[in-house]
Image (spheres, grey):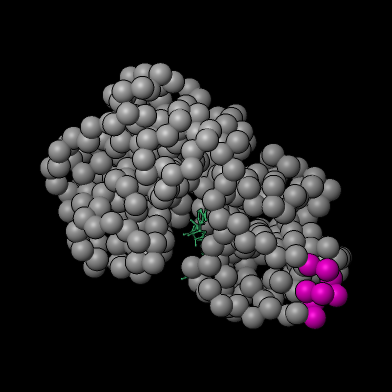
């Protein structure tokens, strides 16, 4: 099969499009013919550049931390899945065979595309317990992005922040991946009031298209003052930030009102940010970091996406052979929305 192989860290051109042996599913594993794998700023681009060595990637590596496609073969003892089923998988999964429903699994785990071969390939083998069936209404390109971003955003807003319909949330980096799906979960699933904030006029305008009630361009305006104006000085109930911009986040933090909750699963512009502790205790604020997601939410996320309540923005779909170009686009900041690699396009 064709795959992208990362044998050493470096610029995008170190990503090599080459022939490798077809992977063979072991007991409890399935093989997926990949139709989509998303390209990520940290887990693909920074990892390729050698900035994520702490995650312990095993080189040479087929990257790609998610995949959506069709079951192509099943290993021994797999009864839940059969060839032809439409599926997706993402993120952390067992490194050894596991029970098909995931119950009782206690062995070592790690991310596909980091600790085990990933989705930047025509075929990928994943544990049967790590796979979810896709609704017919969801195409593969969107499905890969949904499994990558929506469950994390869902977990932060629904489970961790416990955002309510009567509350107001401030979504930072609102034109980004977690930001844009965060707006749609807050608005279309929870029914909360959404103030979406981004660093430029066009990115703020994009946030409006995702359904935000109000938008703020923090590149040109004081985010704290704008939010206090929009909330009649009450402040917001939830601050959803996955960027940790040291210039902007301290101002947004001061726009959290009484009982406010700051939730986060990302810090690519930080990680160190100065926080006003007086505001923290006076307003009884809690800060919760929570990467990942609850597997039980996956079907809810896919159903919401299939129903059109959550639609991630895809900048473009490229053939697998153009993985290096995809990395350049993400690095340049010119991509607005996700870049998806589709190995069926070459
Ligand atoms: N733990 C998990 O489960 C999980 C899952 C997905 C993502 N994440 C993490 O969450 C974070 C956000 O992911 P994402 O895919 O939403 O990111 P993204 O779309 O690539 O970027 C989000 C926003 O960050 C701002 N930004 C980008 N580069 C920046 C820089 N160098 N300095 C300052 N601001 C910058 C931009 O907003 P403005 O220019 O408008 O400010 C951008 O829209 C990442 O750190 C990612 O690793 C975690």
Q: Is residue 172 left or right of residue 114?
A: right
31 or 308: nearer the viewer: 31
Q: Which residues are magenta?
A: 278-285
Task: Report the residue at 83% width, 68% height from top.
Answer: 284
| Residue 238 point in image, percent of width and height | 74, 59
137 or 334: nearer the viewer: 137
Magenta span main SS: helix
User: From this viewpoint, which residue is outermost toward the left?
Assistant: 19
Q: Which quadrant would the C terminus be assigned to in this image?
A: top left
Residue 59 seen by the camera: yes
Residue 261, quarter of the rendered image: bottom right
Q: Which quadrant would the N terminus be assigned to in this image?
A: top left
- In magenta segment, residue 283: yes
Q: Is residue 125 left or right of residue 217?
A: left
Q: Is residue 108 left or right of residue 299?
A: left
Residue 41, quarter of the rendered image: bottom left
State how many labels appear: 0
Give the answer, above or below, for where 98 lies relative to 274: above
């Amino acid at each position: 099969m064709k795959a992208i192989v990362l044998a050493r860290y470096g610029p995008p051109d170190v990503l090599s499009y080459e022939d490798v042996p077809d992977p063979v599913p072991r007991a409890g594993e399935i093989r997926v013919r990949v139709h989509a794998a998303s390209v990520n700023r940290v887990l693909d681009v920074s990892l390729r550049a050698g900035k994520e060595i702490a995650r312990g990637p095993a080189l040479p590596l087929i990257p790609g931390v998610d995949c959506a496609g069709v079951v192509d073969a099943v290993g021994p003892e797999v009864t839940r899945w059969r060839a032809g089923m439409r599926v997706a998988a993402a993120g952390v999964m067992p490194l050894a065979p596991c029970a098909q429903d995931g119950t009782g699994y206690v062995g070592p785990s790690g991310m596909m595309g980091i600790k085990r071969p990933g989705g930047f390939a025509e075929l990928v083998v994943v544990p049967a317990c790590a796979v979810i069936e896709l609704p017919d209404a969801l195409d593969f390109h969107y499905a890969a992005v949904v499994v990558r971003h929506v469950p994390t955003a869902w977990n932060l807003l629904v489970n961790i922040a416990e955002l309510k319909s009567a509350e107001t949330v401030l979504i930072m980096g609102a034109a980004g991946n977690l930001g844009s799906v965060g707006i749609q979960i807050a608005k279309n699933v929870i029914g909360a009031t959404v103030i979406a904030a981004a660093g430029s006029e066009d990115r703020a305008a994009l946030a409006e298209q995702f359904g935000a009630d109000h938008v703020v361009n923090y590149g040109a305006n004081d985010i704290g003052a704008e939010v206090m104006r929009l909330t009649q000085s009450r402040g917001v109930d939830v601050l959803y930030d996955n960027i940790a911009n040291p210039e902007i986040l301290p101002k947004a933090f001061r726009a959290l009102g009484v009982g406010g909750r700051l939730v986060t699963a990302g810090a690519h512009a930080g990680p160190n940010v100065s926080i006003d502790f007086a505001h923290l205790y006076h307003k009884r604020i809690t800060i919760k970091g929570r990467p990942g997601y609850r597997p039980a939410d996956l079907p809810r996320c896919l159903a919401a996406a299939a129903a059109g309540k959550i639609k991630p923005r895809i900048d473009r779909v490229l053939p697998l052979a153009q993985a290096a170009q995809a990395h350049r686009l993400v690095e340049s900041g010119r991509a607005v929305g996700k870049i998806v690699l589709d190995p069926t396009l070459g």
